[in-house]
Image (cartoon, grey):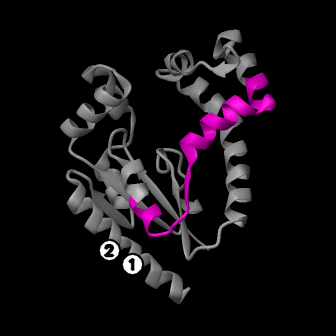
Amino acid sequence: MIIVGLTGGIGSGKTTIGKYFESYGIPIYIADKEAKALMNRSKVIKRKLIQIFGESAYKNGRLNRPYLASKIFNNKSLLAEMNAIVHPKVASHFKRWLKRQDAPYIIKEAAIIFENNLEYQYDYIITVITDEDLRIERVMQRDDVTAEKVQSIIRNQLPDKEKIEKSDFVIENNDLETSAKQAFKIHQEILEKSKQS
């Protein structure tokens, strides 16, 4: 089974691109979504996060995302501690999910593949890039945050230029018609590669 990583900075439109591949019958695993679900569901994760962040980590039994985000945003060591708790659980959940799939390849959507040096986990990596103005606009609408907030998140992520250099494929997602064509072309290329392997 070929494992393809789908990545890109905040607001680049990874989820939209993922939906194109889904429409071609390709299973998609969205790592961030599964991580959030596990943080709400797993008693072990809950217990460990409360040990680090205190009782405020959860509110009415649900993950208190704004609180956690404020704690880890400028604190790399707290972020690393949280990732060390959550990532192994997501990895084993992904392995179980992968065993149930029957397709020429699957896509795992993950925001920080390069930042966490996880390239080795993928056969190919697709990076989605979008003009920064458009990214800021999208995230402001989606998350109801300020432009400054989005810019500070973008600055914390690896620049697109570096991601492009490390990727097998790049999709420019400034307009949907163009990005849909690019996605379909990549889909056909990976199908060809899957026949050869």
Q: Is residue 92 left or right of residue 10?
A: right
Give above or below for 183 relative to 115: below
Q: CA distance from mark 1 to mark 2?
A: 5 Å
Question: Which residue: 33% across, 22% down?
Answer: 149
Instruction: Residue 2: name its quadrant.
Output: bottom right
Instruction: Residue 34: name its quadrant.
Output: top right
188 inside magenta stretch: no
Q: Which mark is residue 188?
A: 1
**Dot 1: few (<14), some (14–19), or many (≥20) neighbours within 10 Å?**
few
Q: Secondary structure at mark 1?
A: helix
Tell me which amino acid carries mark 1. Answer: Gln
Q: Position of residue 75 (x, y in %)?
A: 52, 21
Tell me which amino acid carries mark 2. Answer: Lys
The quadrant of the rendering that contains the N terminus is bottom right
**Dot 2: few (<14), some (14–19), or many (≥20) neighbours within 10 Å?**
few
Look at the numbered discs 1 and 2 and tell me whether their residues touch, using CB distance below 8 Å: yes
Q: Is residue 176 left or right of residue 9?
A: left
- The foreground one among 95 and 114 is 95
Q: Position of residue 104 (x, y in %)?
A: 56, 77
Residue range (magenta):
20-48
Q: Position of residue 38 (x, y in %)?
A: 69, 37
